[in-house]
Image (tube, helix red, strand yellow):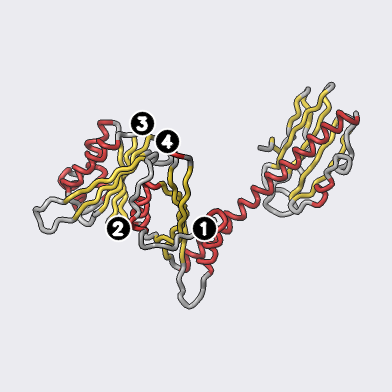
């Protein structure tokens, strides 16, 4: 593609063309940028091996875009991060005023914040909003999502929700970014972390935006699947903890009674016999080995087996899991020398 064509496309607001032109000046410095456009909101991510300098990168991009005067772009968010980082280390907001007539240069105002910035009283957007709700976010977001997605009343409105933790200094910028993506404020509450001069303000915010009925159903299905996955992981984690407790109790029983317990009652763990998610069984293999199994009662759960081996004057334990969800206990672990090992078809539990 010729240089003149690239410039023309950039002037028309093409984000890829804009990024290509910016890269011509920044790549020799080891910085690469990518650009995305949402309505009149351009987001530019600058990335290098180390965090790029905020001031120089912002000034370079602002100067280049100011010369291009791309059509339809009113705001630019510039983010900088080091390669491998998940989140930007800094953000800059450039507001471009569209020229009133041809030949009049655009006026640009830049606001810059760092992720570790102190509280900033730029909350005019919220001054007219008095009903900041004390929302229990972790429990409430799923309920809000389900309620919004299942609302089949006369209004026929469907919503999707997102939760954000926003520092004081980034509040206005975050509101503008999400607003440009179609999100609107649903509820918020403010919290303060730290004490004295080290305290920082944080807003816990729920945003929502309208979606089609089909998208709402997809969101609901994804939320239900995510909730089911979390429930399975929680049940499996609890099973491993209970299995570990039973094996530790068996070790202690062997020390105090000079034999292995043959029932959960002897280990004072009768509650394992009435578990909702798993069926627990204890078996004495011989006078030097015993095992405890935890078999899932519902599909989707992994099953487990734990074993205690008497090795010399001490004991060794191991917990193994099925490689896939199973309603059958894994094979009994074996002892190789003085080291317990999981049998074929099972693996050491995390």
Looking at marks 2 and 1 on the same chain, the residue that comes earlier in the sequence is marked by: 2
Residue 39 circle label: 2
> Badge 4 local density, few (<14 within 10 Å), some, or many (20+)?
few
State the residue at coordinates (76%, 29%): 340
- Spatial CA distance of label 1 from label 4 is 33 Å
**SS assignment at label 4:** loop
Distance from disc 2 to disc 4, alpha carbons, whole Å, reads 29 Å
| Sooner in the amino-acid sequence: mark 3 or mark 2 | 2
Question: Most extreme residue toward the bottom, as rendered?
Answer: 154
Q: Which mark is residue 135?
A: 1
Residue 15: x, y in percent? 27, 49
Judge left or right: residue 118 versus residue 279.
left
Task: Identify the residue at horizontal 37%, vertical 40% (top origin).
Answer: 117
Residue situated furthest front in the rendering: 196
Q: Earlier in the sequence, mark 4 or mark 3?
A: 3
Q: Are marks 4 and 3 in contact (CB under 8 Å)?
A: no
Q: CA distance from mark 3 to mark 2?
A: 31 Å
Closer to us: mark 1 or mark 4? 1
- The alpha-carbon separation of the residues under discs 4 and 3 comes to 10 Å
Q: Camera-side residue: 25 or 250? A: 250
Q: Earlier in the sequence, mark 1 or mark 4?
A: 4
User: Which is more foreground, mark 1 or mark 3?
Assistant: 1
Task: Classify residue 216 as left or right of residue 319.
Answer: left
Q: Mark 3 highlights which residue?
A: 50
**Which quadrant would residue 71 be assigned to in this image?**
bottom left
The label shown at residue 84 is 4
């Amino acid at each position: 593609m010729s240089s003149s064509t690239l410039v023309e496309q950039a002037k028309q607001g093409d984000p890829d063309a804009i990024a290509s032109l910016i890269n011509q000046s920044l790549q020799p410095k080891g910085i690469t940028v990518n650009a995305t456009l949402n309505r009149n909101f351009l987001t530019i991510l600058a990335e290098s091996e180390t965090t790029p300098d905020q001031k120089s990168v912002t000034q370079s991009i602002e100067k280049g875009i100011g010369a291009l005067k791309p059509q339809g772009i009113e705001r630019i968010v510039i983010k900088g991060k080091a390669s491998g980082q998940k989140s930007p280390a800094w953000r800059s907001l450039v507001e471009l005023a569209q020229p009133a007539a041809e030949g009049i240069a655009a006026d640009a105002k830049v606001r810059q914040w760092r992720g570790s910035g102190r509280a900033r009283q730029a909350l005019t957007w919220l001054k007219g909003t008095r009903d900041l709700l004390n929302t229990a976010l972790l429990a409430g977001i799923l309920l809000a999502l389900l309620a919004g997605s299942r609302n089949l009343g006369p209004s026929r409105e469907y919503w999707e929700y997102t939760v954000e933790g926003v520092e004081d200094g980034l509040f206005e910028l975050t509101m503008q970014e999400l607003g440009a993506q179609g999100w609107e404020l649903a509820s918020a509450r403010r919290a303060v972390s730290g004490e004295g001069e080290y305290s920082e303000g944080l807003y816990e915010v729920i945003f929502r935006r309208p979606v089609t009925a089909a998208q709402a159903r997809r969101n609901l299905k994804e939320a239900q699947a995510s909730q089911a996955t979390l429930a399975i992981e929680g049940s499996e984690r609890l099973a491993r903890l209970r299995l570990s407790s039973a094996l530790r109790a068996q070790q202690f029983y062997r020390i105090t009674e000079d034999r292995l317990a043959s029932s959960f009652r002897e280990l004072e763990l009768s509650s394992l016999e009435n578990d909702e998610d798993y069926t627990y069984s204890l078996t004495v293999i011989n006078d030097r080995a015993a095992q405890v199994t935890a078999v899932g009662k519902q599909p989707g759960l992994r099953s487990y087996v734990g074993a205690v081996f008497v090795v010399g004057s001490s004991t060794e334990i191991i917990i193994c899991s099925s490689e896939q969800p199973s309603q059958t206990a894994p094979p009994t672990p074996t002892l190789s020398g003085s080291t317990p090992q999981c049998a074929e078809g099972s693996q050491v539990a995390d």
